[in-house]
Image (spheres, rainbow, N blue to C red):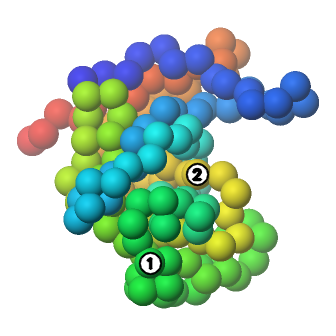
């Protein structure tokens, strides 16, 4: 399963085109899901969602494992919960992602998502491709 030549998107007239990927986030315990656009973020170690998505998925935000993490805006608290991430025909195993009260953009980071793919971003053409890594 490869996701090829996905055009960059912008969500507002003044927004800069970015590599947004439509994904479905699934709570494996309740099968509740949300469809969102996640920003491909090679600088993010983990995937992270705004805190509001925890309740939409049936998670109690503050019952997750809490930790303090560093972001571009300084230190913040994050609550980790288990989810699956579906993109196209690909679905992750259960992965831990962070839900953050001070975040407004869903981020698709390296450890629990991007590390499964070879990523090619073509900025002049404003498109990107994700190709599933071959298992060794």
Does residue 87 appear in the picture of this structure? yes
**Residue toward you, 74 or 85:** 85
Element class at badge 2 = loop
Q: CA distance from mark 1 to mark 2?
A: 18 Å
**Residue 31 vs residue 125: left or right?**
left
User: Seen in the image, is 95 located left or right of residue 15?
Assistant: left
Position of residue 113 relative to residue 7, above or below, is below
Mark toward the viewer: 1 or 2: 1
Taking the spot 43% from the left edge, 33% from the top edge, the residue there is: 119
Residue at x 64% of width, y 23% of height = 8
Instruction: Write the residue at 39% across / 66% down.
Output: 58
Tell me where residue 117 appears, x and y as whole percent: 33, 37
Which residue is at the front of the view, 87 or 129?
Answer: 87
Image quarter where the C terminus lies is top left
Give the residue furthest to the left.
Answer: 136
Which of the two labelled residues, at mark 1 and mark 2, occupies the earlier sequence position? 1
**How would you rate the neighbour count of disc 1 (Cα within 10 Å): few for under 14, some for 14-19, many for 20 or more?**
few
Q: Which residue is mark 2?
A: 106
Q: Is residue 89 above or below residue 135?
A: above
In the rendered view, does 23 fall on the left or right side of 18?
left
Whether residue 115 is visible to the viewer of this picture, yes or no, is: no
Say if 129 sits above or below 51 in the image: above
Q: Which mark is residue 23?
A: none
Q: Secondary structure at mark 1?
A: loop
Q: Position of residue 9 (x, y in %)?
A: 67, 25
Return the residue at label 1: 60
Q: In this rendering, would 35 be left or right of 33? A: right
């Amino acid at each position: 399963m490869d996701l090829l030549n996905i055009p960059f998107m912008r969500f507002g007239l003044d927004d800069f085109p970015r590599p947004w990927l439509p994904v479905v986030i699934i709570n494996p315990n309740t099968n509740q899901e949300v469809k969102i656009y996640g920003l491909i973020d090679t600088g993010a170690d983990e995937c992270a969602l705004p805190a509001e998505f925890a309740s939409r998925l049936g998670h109690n935000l503050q019952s997750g494992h809490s930790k303090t993490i560093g972001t571009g805006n300084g230190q913040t608290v994050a609550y980790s919960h288990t989810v699956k991430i579906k993109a196209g025909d690909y679905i992750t195993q259960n992965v831990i992602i962070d839900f953050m009260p001070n975040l407004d953009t869903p981020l698709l980071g390296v450890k629990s998502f991007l590390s499964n793919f070879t990523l090619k971003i073509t900025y002049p053409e404003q498109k990107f491709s994700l190709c599933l890594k071959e298992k060794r």
